[in-house]
């Protein structure tokens, strides 16, 4: 009786192994076909369509003949505005160690080596 249950278990394991290997190789074959044939066809279709050239026109924009002094004042004002948004403050960071009581319920060693510790 025991010999039959072992052979049934081996046959079931063999079936699961073969189905798993078949599924993996079928998936790899499908991926190979997609990347070999479908992707080049998609890329050819994308490259075949004419691309529209986008031309942006700014209407009503006039080029200002501002002097270097005006540009320097504008840059200084922007710099001061950004620096005020990031005020430097004295930061004092205090780290104190918190002492916790040991609890075997939260110990991971019993979960990892549970059966080996009770020998």
Image: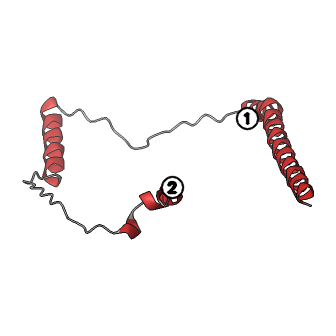
Q: Considering depth in this image, is 60 or 13 the residue closer to the camera? A: 13
Quarter location, residue 110: bottom left
Look at the picture and state if 69 lies above or below 85: above
| Circle 1 SS class | helix
Q: Circle 1 is placed at which residue position?
A: 46
Judged from this view, the residue extending furthest toward the left is: 90
Does label 2 or label 1 sit earlier along the sequence? Answer: 1
Q: Considering depth in this image, is 41 or 113 the residue closer to the camera? A: 113
Q: Residue 51 placed where, x, y %?
A: 67, 34
Q: Residue 38 placed where, x, y %?
A: 81, 35
Q: Residue 7 placed where, x, y %?
A: 90, 52
Q: Quadrant of the N terminus?
A: bottom right
Residue at horizontal 10 percent and vertical 51 percent from the top = 88
Q: Circle 2 is placed at which residue position?
A: 116
Q: Considering depth in this image, is 65 or 51 the residue closer to the camera? A: 51
Direction from residue 114 to residue 42 in the image, left or right: right
Label 2: how many Cα within 10 Å (few below 14, some 14–19, many 20+): few
Q: Determine contact: label 2, label 1, CB under 8 Å.
A: no
Label 1: how many Cα within 10 Å (few below 14, some 14–19, many 20+): few
Query: How far is mark 2 from mark 1, CA to CA?
Result: 61 Å
Quarter location, residue 74: top left
Quarter location, residue 97: bottom left
């Amino acid at each position: 009786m025991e010999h039959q249950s072992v052979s049934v278990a081996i046959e079931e394991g063999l079936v699961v192994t073969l189905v798993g290997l078949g599924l993996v190789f079928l998936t790899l074959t499908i991926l190979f076909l997609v990347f070999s044939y479908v992707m080049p066809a998609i890329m050819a279709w994308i490259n075949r369509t004419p691309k529209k050239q986008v031309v942006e026109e700014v209407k009503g924009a006039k080029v200002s003949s501002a002097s270097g002094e005006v540009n320097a004042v504008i840059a200084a004002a922007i710099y001061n505005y950004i620096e005020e948004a990031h005020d430097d403050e004295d930061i004092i960071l205090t780290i104190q160690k918190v002492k916790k009581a040991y609890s075997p319920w939260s110990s991971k060693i019993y979960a990892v080596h549970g059966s080996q510790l009770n020998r």
